[in-house]
Image (spheres, rainbow, N blue to C red):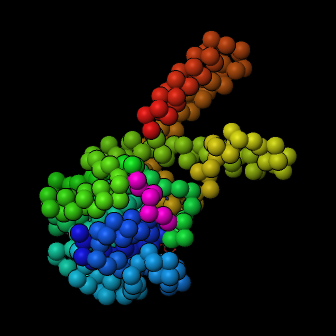
Amino acid sequence: MINRLTIIGVGLIGGSLARALKNAHAVGEVVGCGRNIEHLQNALTLGVIDRYETDLGAALHDTDVVVLAVPVGVTLSVMQSIKPHLDPKTIITDVGSSKGAVVQAAQQVFGDALENFVPGHPIAGTEKSGVEASFAELFHKRRVLLTPLANTSTAALQTIRQMWETTGAFVEETSVAHHDDVLAATSHLPHMLAFALVDALATMDDKVEIFRYAAGGFRDFTRIASSDPQMWHDICVTNDKAIVAMLDVFMADLERLRNAIKTGDSDYLLQVFTRAKKARDQFSMDS
Ligand code: NAP
């Protein structure tokens, strides 16, 4: 049971976490904090938070856990502004989609005093943004990766693990570097492909015709291109090396596929499609 939880950035992820913990009666009070009063008022009206504060001192007073649920690009400035108001007992966690930059920001702001900082990332989301899109079941049966640091305290880690388990998530621990490499492959690369495909088609001369005749395959493949541009900008900037490495591998594979189509290499085409279908079918069975 967390007595008081402060969420900075009550959007899709922050709002869904608040809803899940409230539904499970696992939190006494949820305090929302952010830059936009209208959005915070909306969160209050929806019952996602119990009160909101725009003053950080008031938002962080006597709070047990503070969750940073803002775009990763603003993590550093948010950490700098919360630092003077933090109680030594308050546990800090985040939900950012890349972890290297978040940990670097924490080290820059808090130095070695990182016992109460537990970096985290729920592997769950949708292409929608804002508190209106939040829902309590978002993390149910989904993974949450925690990337504790060498000096993260066992008690802080245990509190954040329990918090996520309460939402119905499976919690795993991994290293920061491993997290960023794996997510570059499984999440960041597919988003790059979806954004690039939709943008390429949207900027073609006959785009009206293309979108009119686009069918299920296009819809399935490109849903995630509706995701928030600022959030994805920040992920690219903060996980650039791993994403570029994955793009290089993928572009080499795509070039081979292009050549096989051009030269009519049926064996290669059937080999790739068969292998991919088997892997995708297996993934569907496992998930
Ligand atoms: P969201 O719905 O857009 O919510 C973001 C929240 O951050 C909003 O409350 C927003 O406040 C606040 N915010 C934005 N820019 C800010 C700034 N410059 N200063 C202070 N607050 C700011 O986004 P989200 O999908 O919840 O994403 C939040 C975090 O979760 C990101 O770090 C993202 O990488 C991570 N994440 C997202 C997903 C996903 O699928 N969406 C999945 C896992 C993790 P306003 O109301 O004022 O705009």
In this view, the residue in front, 246 or 163, is 163
Q: At 16% from the left edge and 74% from the top edge, which residue is drawn?
A: 89
* Location of residue 50 (image quadrant): bottom left
In this view, the residue in front, 19 or 247, is 19
The verdict on residue 200 being magenta is no
Q: List x then y, in percent, for residue 286.
A: 43, 34
Is residue 26 placed above or below 237 in the rendered structure?
Answer: below
Q: List x then y, in percent, for residue 72.
A: 42, 62
Q: At 47% from the left edge and 28% from the top edge, which residue is drawn?
A: 282
Is residue 10 placed above or below 105 in the rendered structure?
Answer: below
The quadrant in which the N terminus is found is bottom left
In the image, 95: left or right of 266? left
Residue range in magenta is 134-140
**Taken as a whole, is the magenta stretch helix, strand or loop?**
loop
Q: At 20% from the left edge and 58% from the top edge, which residue is drawn?
A: 157
The quadrant in which the C terminus is found is top left
Is residue 142 placed above or below 79 in the rendered structure?
Answer: above
Q: At 33% from the left edge and 83% from the top edge, which residue is drawn?
A: 59
The verdict on residue 135 being magenta is yes
Q: List x then y, in percent, for residue 129.
A: 54, 65
